[in-house]
Image (cartoon, helix red, strand yellow):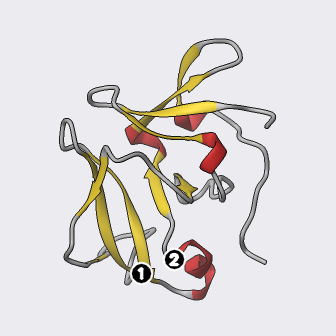
Amino acid sequence: PELCAVFHCRGCWTVLGDSLQLCAPEAPRLGFLACFKVTSDVIWEDSLLVGLEEPLLGCAYNALSCRSCGLSVGFILHSAASDMAYLRGLFCFFKDRILCYLLENQMVIEASNVDFPAVTLKK
C-alpha cells in the first residue's frame, strides 16, 4: 500500500480501523471514508435512521459510534439513491471525526488532510 494509516477516534484516540480496509476513499463532496472492516471498538445502533440533511438525505442507515467515548464517528448505509448505492453495507467514517496516524512518517494528521490512493467500488 502506498499510504498506511491507522484511524483513531477524534474524541479519545481509540483505534477504529486502518487504511488496509479502505475501499472507497474518493468521496470528497461527502466527507467520509468507507471501509470493509473496523475494530470491535466501533459500535452501531440496531435501529435504522433516515437522513434529513445532505449528504444522507433520504438514506436509511445505522449510526456508528466509538465504544470508548460514545462519539458519533460515521454510519452503515442500508438504502440510498443510485449515486451512493455502492456504499451500502460499508463502514463509513466521517473525516472530521477521525484522526489518521501515518505509519511511514509516524505523524498524526486530520483525516480531511490525507489523500489516500484512488480506490473505487462504483463499477
Q: Earlier in the sequence, mark 1 or mark 2?
A: 1
Going by the numbered disc 2, the residue's amino acid type is Arg
Q: Residues within 10 Å of mark 2 (few under 14, many from 20)?
A: some
| Quarter of the rendering containing residue 67 | top left
Q: Residue at image x 38%, y 62%?
A: 75
Give x and y (percent) for residue 40: 34, 47
Do callouts 1 and 2 mark residues in contact (Cβ within 8 Å)? yes
Which residue reaches farthest front? 40
Labelled disc at residue 78: 1
Labelled disc at residue 14: none
101 w.r.t. 55: above or below: above
Helix, strand or loop at label 2? It is: loop
Seen from the viewer's position, the closer of residues 94 and 76 is 76
Give x and y (percent) for residue 72: 27, 50
Which residue reaches farthest top? 106
Q: CA distance from mark 1 to mark 2?
A: 5 Å
| Quarter of the rendering containing residue 1 | top right
4 w.r.t. 32: above or below: above
Lateral position of residue 118 relative to residue 68, left or right: right
Seen from the viewer's position, the closer of residues 46 and 85 is 46
Numbered circles on residues, count: 2
Q: Residues within 10 Å of mark 1 (few under 14, many from 20)?
A: some
Query: Where is the C terminus found, in terms of image quarters?
Result: bottom right
51 w.r.t. 14: above or below: below
119 w.r.t. 39: above or below: below
Residue labelled with disc 2: 88
Lateral position of residue 30 relative to residue 51, left or right: right
Going by the numbered disc 1, the residue's amino acid type is His
Give x and y (percent) for residue 59: 39, 81
Q: Residue at image x 66%, y 57%?
A: 23
Lateral position of residue 3 relative to residue 77, left or right: right
Helix, strand or loop at label 1? It is: strand
